[in-house]
Amino acid sequence: MSSSPTSHYSGMSSVTVWFIMFLLGPVQAQLGTTPNIKHIVVGRCYNYITLYPNMRLDCEDIWRQFEESVVRQSSFNETVDYHQMFSAINQTWPSDGFLFWSKTRRLVESYTSIGRDFWTLADTLVGYLFTGLVWCGREDKSGFNFKSCPTWAEIKHHPVYSLWRQASLNFAEMARGNITVLLNGSIRNAFNRESMFGSFELDALDPCRAESVNIKVVTDLDGPFIESCNQGSVVDLIQILRSRGFHWTCTDNDESLMILQCIQNPKQSSCQKCANSFSLRRSLKMN
Ligand code: AVW
């Protein structure tokens, strides 16, 4: 029995509509301000105090400053100015171990979680409070918009982007000692002048405070192998560092980062090849 053109059409359209709803539904739900954002931020703030008991923080006040900044500037015509919230935070800074990254966030998260002595933006209070959260104000300035927020690409002055930009800038201004930069050698423009690292952090680094800037270019284990210390945009980064008087080093495929990737994904073919290598066996024994 053949279906009539009409029923065939309506069958197709309901599948299409279902598919579009499937695609849009979860996306729209995620685009609004993160539910319970206040409890999450204030809870994380108290947790941060347990990690760094020497920091004196008024978590409720930090939340108030944050909320006021977002709600006040909720028209998206201007950058949200978070400076009052930053002033309410007396961040303590380490003297070494600053780690910057671009397009390598997941790797950095596992790298720092295995106890490497690095300090990333996510270790500062602001990074810790807002990681993974989304927010925007309602246009009538009556509070947060929990229904939908624009994406970063849609508007110039996104409140989430503005916070990360300000936080990144502060972080880079405080960087000193040995500074590490982790770049993704499996993509073009591993060093991208449009990225947060390339457009704000790099310019804010001070050659007088930095002992050395140590670039690590890491590729996915099975490639593609697109950029390296002497190929592609990394060369431009080195040129900028040189011209600004930084001491620098550059390493391709740092061994511990390769091993870390193998531990996460031992089935990768390049991990099979080196599975018998001494260092991998040693590191697996340690875990
Ligand atoms: P990207 P970028 N939680 O991979 O060079 C959520 O293109 O642009 O690299 N978002 C975050 C977090 C976090 N914990 N940390 C940074 N972001 C934002 C900050 C970030 O601001 C670090 F210090 C950027 O817009 C890196 O050296 C985006 O996520 C540098 O900026 C990642 O974009 C990475 O920025």
Image (spheres, rainbow, N blue to C red):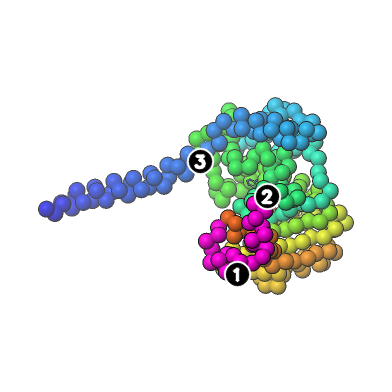
Of 151 and 155, nearer the camera is 151
Residue 114 is tagged as 2
Helix, strand or loop at label 2? It is loop
Which mark is drawn over residue 225?
1
Mark 3 and 1 residues: CB-CB less than 8 Å, in contact?
no
Observer able to see residue 129: yes
Of residues 123 and 264, the one drawn nearer to the viewer in this rendering: 264
- Measured from the top left, where is residue 16 in percent x and y? 32, 49
Left or right: 176 with respect to 215? right
- From the viewer's perspective, tell me whether residue 197 is left or right of residue 226: right
Query: Counting residues from the N terminus, which is met first, the one under dot 3 or under dot 2?
Result: 3
Look at the numbered disc 3 and give the secondary structure of its residue. helix
Which residue: 75% across, 50% down?
Answer: 117
Q: Viewer-nearest of labels 2 and 1? A: 2
Residue at the spot of label 3: 30
Q: Main secondary structure of the magenta part?
A: helix
**Residue 280 within the magenta-colored segment of the rendering:** yes
**Residues packed near mark 2 inside 10 Å, few (<14), some (14 to 19) or many (20 plus):** few
In the rendered structure, which amino acid carries the disc numbered 3? Gln
Percent position (x, y) of residue 284?
63, 56
**Residues drawn in magenta:** 265-287
Gap in angstroms between the C-alphas marked 3 and 2: 30 Å
Q: Does the closest atom of ligand 1 sit within 8 Å of the Cβ of label 2?
A: no
Tell me the quarter of the picture where residue 129 sits: top right
